[in-house]
Amino acid sequence: MDVSTPPCGASVVIVGGGVTGLSAGWWLAREGVDVLVLDKGLVGWEASGRNGGGCSHHHSPLFAEEQRLWPVMDELLGYPTEFRPGRIRLAADARQMELYGRALANAERQGFASDRLDAGQARDLVPLAGATIVGGYRYRFGGQANPHRTLQGYAWAMQDHGGRVLQHATVTGFHSEGDRVRGVETDRGVFACDHLVIAAGPQTGRLAAILDAQLPLVSARWEMIVTEALPLMPMGGVDGCGLYGRQTLRGNLAYGGGPHEWLDGADLGTPPKPSSPLTLNIGKRLAQLFPKAAHARVIRSGAGMIENTPDGRPVIDRLASRANVTVATLSSVGFGLSPASGRAIRDLVVDGACGFADLSSLSLARFARLEPDWRARQGWLAPA
Amino acid sequence: MSETRRADPRSVAGKNLPVEERPDVLVVGAGPAGLAAAIACARAGLAVLQVDENPVPFAAMGDDAPLHYGQAMSGAARNRNAALEAFVASEPRIAEAFEAGVDLRLGVACWGVYANGAAMGWMPGLVAGLADEGRAWLIQPRHIVLACGRRDMGLAFPGWETPGVVGAAAAAALAARYGAFAPRRVVVLGATTPALAAARDLAAQGVEIAAVVEQAREAPGDPALLANARARGAELLTGHVVREVVGAGRVEAAFVCALDARGEPAGGERRIACDGVVLAVGATPVIDLLDAAGGAVAFQPERGGYAPLLDAGQRSTLPGVYAAGDCAGVWDSKTLDRRIAEAEGERAAAAILGAVEAPAAAPPAPGYDLSAYRLDWARASIVHARAPLHVCQCEEVTARELLELRPPRYLGAGPPHPDQVKRLTRAGMGLCQGRRCREQVAALLALQSGEALAAIPLAGYRAPTRPLRLSQMAGLAEDPPLAEHWDTWFGMAAQWRPFWDVPAYYTVAGSDPAQPAASE
């Protein structure tokens, strides 16, 4: 086997330097596990660096752990994530009010409270809001963090514990012996491993297929906009009116939403991530969410390439086809859950099962009866 | 049996953009190249919409958009009508364009160009975003000629944020096109041909050129322009660098000193009284629209830095999108002779019209090493600055932060990607959209890693390439299906089903996409 030096491998090789892979690497490294994270390009360059930074995923089995970890992540990592607790979601009409309220029933069942706000209360709490708002909700849980800071935090903290990252290393295949993967083949050489983690975003399905596992995934492009910095509101985590996002600690309004575009070929290489004229539609809604910020100038837009499983739910599982491979895709909802998903991956790698949450709803086996033409049936097709 | 449902209603499939006009040609910019292209296309019978963001609103100038105006505009720039008249009067071919039937709209900016490509397929064709002071809107031209001009590399030194420190292109525009350049006595930094041409244009408007400061031992610019500047009394200080600009509220003086053999400031300083400092160390093509749209650009010293990849018909790599004039490349002879830019505009028109294109002469190689020249400026002015300074004024990122950026080990040995540096430092992430610091940051990364400028990737541009107020978007007429199906996230009911309620097996047939998607 052609083993490159250095580094020639690691006990655990993680393919994918996004938040999920880096968090897993950090959780492993802090216990002394020898970890190497490979990325085809730059760490955090895909969806991990292109999201709203929210941390309130009440539908997920990882929710309780997500809520437990975020308030202590700065301390655990030793680096700032800019996490700020709480969230306010504003509605511009009764339909939105009903929809957003539905989401909170999930949290309440798990013991996390929220308040219903009338229009006056909402405007009192959100200085930039105005007469366009009919009401909203205040979450007494969740929050938002800065994806870029958090990503750096994972990478640096992992390195502090001896973990390594290698950028610009594209995986071309795997070296298997019997039912175990022994090496990761890349354009930078082969890296030996005792255990393999594939957390490669849109590429996860393609890489799993090399190991005889079917992980159905399709990717889509999704867009957001960023304004100039404005004076900080008391709470940065305010969204709604069809938008998802936050005011950053710097003061920028970073929001996205609206139609996504299903694409082919996002599982190969580093696709471009153009934004479209949806910038205007997002800006129109942001002016509705924050009428008192109508003067704010939009200074950039961005898009992310985001993978989804057929039901939009993550897969965090050990492969049945190999004895030492863990796969993880967070299916378009990964950033906020990353402290918990990384720990879950650590458990799967080290203990063989997650010790703090029931991951059965995230198993790969749930797609065993999936229709082969599921993608067409769901209409997840790229424009002709 | 395969049951195919309709396209995902929450996706872009079947959604339409509110395109307001469909001209044959959109020309962005009404300088020599843009006017030549527009006039030629209009005379051939095409419907030509030409926009130019001049006269730039006073408030936008205050934000250094689209150029580094550096608060050097006089009160005359506040008067929109006067500015409009002055702008039109200073370019005779504008009247010619109107006569030729060009739909020329001044005070209208183009802030985005969109084209289908590998990762976007729902555009109906080429789409461009336009804006005036009141609103933003979309058009769908068959062809786009980009003639967006040039801008200047910023150069930091202590005090460079002082009002009156202005880019050469902005200074020349304010003086020659608006009659609204406030400084009366300036120091010009750089003795390249674009720098000396700016000095000439300023002098023609009565501005005194106190000195031309050049870090190189010999002025690299056009000898005749240099002789002209000196004949008018400008002192040429080669082998010098600016140390500081001082002034309370506006520039009052520049301190300069000589450089030693290593290119480091040495010896006594001189105080030069002035009320303006003109940054003219690097004229560079304006490529923001093309790069943001996915058109190919590359570092080409003979074109003044990052410039579009073009064929003999001025075609970019984006079908239907052309570049002409300074935005296609800045070089000395083009700076001195507008007919070169005009010929490029005419060549783009010929390509659009399917006519035989006069072959373009390749730009001559610059008479000096453009990368080394700009790096020498950055080293002398920024690296050896005697006091802390902000290279990125918007986000207040210091040179030290950039030079001593904790290099994450995973960045490897090569120079970091400027887009990664943005995330690590916020440099270039502010309201000026990186126009003042982009080239400097690249220069510092090059110096740090011992590479030439060509080795530093371009920090990517994003639309809107001009700051757009939310209020300019608020009145957008939306496609009703797009509004009806708008969702915060993917609008997938199954995604948000609580984990205790998830079936053991997922099948399309067993799922109900019509359920409300109660997203996070």
Image: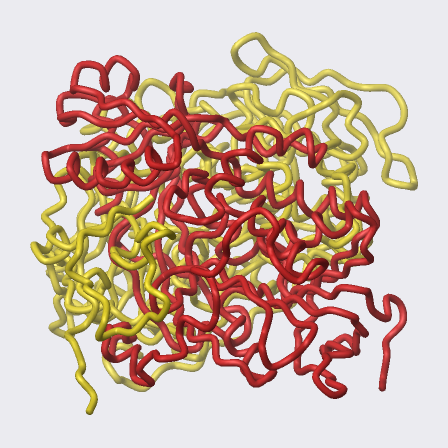
Chain colours: A red, B yellow
Q: How many marks?
A: 0
Q: Is residue B466 above or below residue A68?
A: below
Q: Is residue B79 above or below residue B297?
A: above
Residue B344 showing in the rendered view: no
Q: Nearer the viewer, residue B68 or A1?
A: A1
Taking the spot 74% from the left edge, 88% from the top edge, the residue there is A178
Q: Quadrant of the N terminus of chain B?
A: bottom left
Pick out the residue farthest to the left: B480
Residue B164 showing in the rendered view: yes
Return the x and y of residue B399 as percentages of the image width and height.
Answer: 71, 32
Taking the spot 87% from the left edge, 19% from the top edge, the residue there is B268
Relative to B229, A111 lies left or right: left
Q: Quadrant of residue B473?
A: top left
Relative to A85, A297 lies left or right: left
Q: Quadrant of residue B176?
A: top left
Q: Nearer the viewer, residue B72 or B441?
A: B441
Q: Is residue B266 above or below residue A384?
A: above
Pick out the residue farthest to the right: B261
Taking the spot 25% from the left edge, 57% from the top edge, the residue there is B493
Relative to B199, B471 lies left or right: left
Return the x and y of residue A45 as percentages of the image width and height.
Answer: 56, 56
Relative to B10, A78 lies left or right: right
Q: Quadrant of the C terminus of chain B?
A: top left
Pick out the residue farthest to the top: B248
Taking the spot 58% from the left edge, 54% from the top edge, the residue there is A20
Q: Nearer the viewer, residue B515 or B27?
A: B515
Return the x and y of residue B8 as percentages of the image width and height.
Answer: 21, 67
Return the x and y of residue A360 as percentages of the image width and height.
Answer: 47, 61
